[in-house]
Amino acid sequence: MRQYPKWHDYLINRLASDKEEAIGYLDVALEEYQHDGDAPFFLKGIGNVVEAQGGITELAKRTHMSPDALQKILSSDKAPHLDTLGTILKALGCRLSIEPLASENIGS
């Protein structure tokens, strides 16, 4: 019988092999967070990219934060402070940006 990879393993391999795809994945996670406010889902998305880029220990080296602090942030039910999020995203090779909403999305 053929052994198929688990979805999580497939996702991590894909995010590890294609930086643009990882950034797009984070962008979608952020859009979903902005739509429904589900911080744990957003942080899980960041966690998947962190795993694809070497894990918490590697991210801790890049951010100069402790692995325990990063693990606590990424497993929280609350979104991190903006400066912390910026530090994490920079270490992952991307940044937050501002762009206009479509007029039908304003105020919703």
Image (cartoon, grey):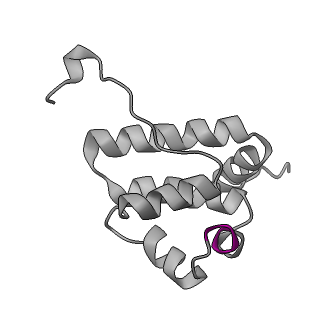
Magenta segment? 59-63
Q: Nearer the viewer, residue 21 or 101?
A: 101
Residue located at (38% from left, 27% from top): 99
Q: Is residue 92 left or right of residue 69?
A: right
Relative height, residue 28 to residue 11 (above, below): above
Q: Is residue 2 left or right of residue 9?
A: right
User: Which quadrant of the rendered structure holds the C terminus?
Assistant: top left
Q: Nearer the viewer, residue 17 or 68?
A: 68
Q: Nearer the viewer, residue 10 or 5?
A: 10
Where residue 92 appears, as percent x and y from the top left, is: 64, 54
Where residue 54 appears, as percent x and y from the top left, is: 74, 64
Relative height, residue 20 to residue 94 (above, below): above
Q: Nearer the viewer, residue 105 or 100?
A: 100
- Residue 58: image quadrant is bottom right
Where residue 93 appears, as percent x and y from the top left, is: 65, 48
Magenta segment includes 8: no
- Residue 24: image quadrant is top right
